Amino acid sequence: MEERKEEAKQESRNEQLLRHKIECMLFVAGDPVAITELARVLDLPMPKMRNLLSEMEYSYRVEGRGVQLLVTHDTAQLVSNRDYIEEVKQLVNPDETKSVSQSLLETLAVIAYRQPVTRADVERVRGVRCDYAVTQLQKLDLIVEVGRKDVVGHPTLFGTTDKFLRQFGIHTVDEMPNFQHYSQEIIEDSSEEIPVV
């Protein structure tokens, strides 16, 4: 009986040590770290690695810590707690960053809700050409080419990236609000002229 208790204590200590190592690596890295890399460095199977990250993420959130763990399907990253953003702003008083334009946000929303989606599909929804918006979103690494549509011409299909998830503080696109406007079926009507903006 005593031996089992000691084994349980040792296992708990080992788990805590792994959490500390993960926290340290993510803190030093700063940027998102591939979960596969964490598993490789710690010599852990992926299911065990994902389970540890999930437990850590939950613990950080419940405790309301200033630093939170954001885990996506591919990466893990330590990020600041958005609940304390006003205090952080008062401390560091950062320069205002250039905001993303309304047209970029609209294009990004269509892609996020309908992905994988072609440029023509996005233009049908928005009613305007979106070449510039799509190019800018690719440069910002918020969207990426994910394949080709199996139709004449094989147009490029776009989808959101891991950076998109991190930017909006979500784990998967399933966490996005259910917005009917962007989730309805695309009306295939390429006969309409689309103005350029």
Image (cartoon, grey):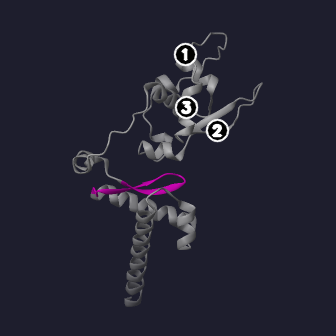
Mark in the foreground, 2 or 3? 2
Secondary structure beneath dot 2 equals strand
The Cα–Cα distance between marks 2 and 3, rounded to whole angstroms, is 11 Å
At mark 1, the secondary structure is loop
Screen quadrant of the N terminus:
bottom left
Circle 1 residue: 127
In-front residue for pair 15/110:
110
Residue position for label 2: 145
Identify the magenta region: 64-79
The label on residue 111 is 3
- The amino acid beneath tag 2 is Glu
Q: Position of residue 130 (x, y in %)?
A: 57, 23
Q: Residues within 10 Å of mark 1 (few under 14, many from 20)?
A: some
Horizontally, is 186 left or right of 21 in the view? right
The amino acid marked with disc number 1 is Gly
The kind of secondary structure the magenta stretch mainly shows is: strand
